[in-house]
Amino acid sequence: MNSKERILARLRHGRASSPATPYDAGGSPAETPVQLDIDSMIQALEAAHATVFRLPAKDWPNHLAGLAKEREWTRWWIGRDEAGKTWQNREPNSPATLFTDWDTQKHDLFDNAQVALSQAQGGITETGTLIVESHSNVPRTLSLVPPVHIVIVHESTLVATLQQALDQYGPGKMPTNLIFISGPSKTADIQQTLAYGAHGPKELVVYLCTAED
Amino acid sequence: MSGFSTHPDHDFDVRIHDALGNAELRESFHGAMHFLRDKRRTQFPDPNALEALRDRGAAIRDRALARLPDLLEQLERNCTRNGIQVHWAETAEEANTLITGLVNAAQGKRIVKGKSMATEEIGLNSAFEAAGFTCLESDMGEYIVQQANETPSHIIMPAIHRNKASIARQFHTQIPETPYTEDVDELIGTGRRVLRRAFAEADVGISGVNFAVAETGTLCLVENEGNGRMSTTVPDMHIAVMGIEKVIERLADLPDLLRLLTRSATGQAVTTYLNLISSPRKQDECDGPRQVHLVLLDNGRSRIYADRQLRETLRCIRCGACMNHCPVYERLGGHAYGTVYPGPIGQVVMPQLHGLDRAGKLTQACSLNGACGEACPVRIPLPDLIRRLRHEGVTQDTGSPVKGHGRQRKPAEALTWKIWSLIHRTPWLYSLTTHLATRARKLLPPWPRAWTNHRAPLEPAERSFREMMEQRGRDPGGKQ
Ligand code: SF4
């Protein structure tokens, strides 16, 4: 027998010799149902130190361009998602770096990237969480390595709770990497003092895009 | 560097004595524990909702444990289908050999590690050192502790025993070109700078797993810093190590468990990152590890599983709330235990892993006040388990799967209890003893020093309670 077989045999034997603790199979239903509430999403994100702008979808590129100027953000990194494409069309003269090849671009990303822009696939209003899937067009390090992360999310993609968000996934429907982001990176490891930008972005800027007009 | 002993009972008294004498340490823990308890309390404002949630948490974990062998096989099947390579290890040594073998095969040299209790448990860092690899801890707290050649003193906040001045000194002396500063933002900035370089250059990333979902073959990692994401995303190879009890049935089980975990651990409604990993980089993706390995670690768990009561230990979601609420842990700090898992859960797990002969004494560091059991989000009856292990430590044939029972037994102590029990079972002997003790109270020898060191010596009363009651029965109107 190999290790796997021995471990499983011990577990099966153990289970047979002392049957399971009875449990309430379904568990009692969750407390009062949580409603989809965009205000609470904004509150939660802001409490987590993120910056939130809520505006019609067509307006974010102009607004972001203004912010970029004010903050002097120059070294942009984007993926081939909707947000990246829109931004590239808006700023054809100051091209952002399109992140496509890890092996040649990795060190540049770590050393030089200042701002990353990406699209979130959805959001959770209860906890102020963004849902970010990795897929062929969007590298997962985009939301992790650059010190500033800007996320575009459409309000039509929001759900109320993590439970509802996970209902959209399941066997056969899992992206390689599914990431739930609820603010900029942080730590309280030194004397319980909160500090932002531990390893991931120090700043998270969220554009909540309302349906047109 | 592992630094944890497989004989935590050795010098336990000495470590307790040192911890109690260290004012700085006591202040750190006192402050930190109050802080964490308050934060948790504000996250659970409604006691009924909390109790209902704890019921659900315990039920989800019991449901998973009831199907444990089947779920592990299902997890392996689904992970394999997703491209994650699954390995099984019965012991710490086997796991270490396996993992160093994987690193060797990939010709890896530089390793980064996200916070993981399972790898602390097997002493992976020492195994890496012996194999000639360098492995940098990347969680800020772990990094601080590793650099100082210490071990974590808390399972969630590894550097909780340190204050910022001592960390400032450490960074200043150990990291080149680092000015002395007690500014926490700057200190974290220094850690970030050093560790970023390590992430970018690492060949292998090691992580733990908070939960693994059987139905999808998904590894879940919960964190705030982003070092877990770095370790599992940037290096070409990701190796995840998890205890076999961490498997859950389905994705829908996650929300309740996460709610309990983050609120109990750090008093957060949600952590910055929830990272669900289901496969290595796919062909058309441009980043992520090319290989993902999952090591399923037994290390005594299947033995614990065979006993229905001890099995409840395996519900643990490693939130740390039991230590945050333990008055003994608060006063001693994590290092005094000398174990990977300190505090109440450590007092229950370590004797089960190492045997009562080596770790049974740990169970004595408990006043049975019950706070840990009330705090535990998955209702592990920690006080009952501590009491049971104490009992097994001094009893011969228990039929329990815990090794080393009876090895805490001291003949003099056992004899004392025997006499005590005899006296209390024999009415005439009881009357005689109390009679003698009350009448001859001035003649009794002084109480042992261990007792009178910090307390006034005890002296029996002039009359026994029973005599006083009898007196009162005869003379109802008399003096009260
Ligand atoms: S025993 Fe309970 S309280 Fe302690 S770490 Fe485990 S889950 Fe948390």
Image: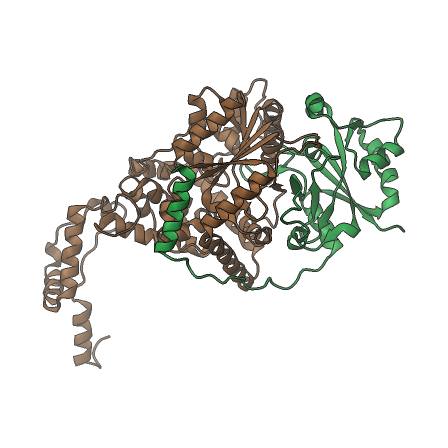
Indicate the quadrant containing the C terminus of chain B: top left, top right, bottom left or bottom right. Answer: bottom left
Residue A146 left/right relative to B346: right
Identify the residue at image location x=65%, y=46%: A172
Q: Position of residue B238 (x, y in %)?
A: 56, 31
Q: Please tell me the colour of chain B.
A: brown
Residue B132 at what x, y percent from top left? 46, 19
The answer to whether any part of residue B35 appears in the image is: no
Instruction: Give B338 or B367, whichever is nearer the viewer.
Output: B338
Looking at the image, residue A7 sits to the left or right of residue B238; the answer is left
Outermost residue to the top: B176
Q: Is residue B169 left or right of residue A18?
A: right
| Chain coloured green here | A
Q: Can residue A185 be seen in the rendering of this structure? A: yes
The residue positioned 46% from the left and 55% from the top of the image is B62
Which of the 4 image quarters holds residue A150?
A: top right
- Residue at x 51%, y 61% (from the top left corner): A25
Residue B20 location (% of width, % of height): 36, 39
Identify which residue, A177 or A86, lies in the foreground: A177
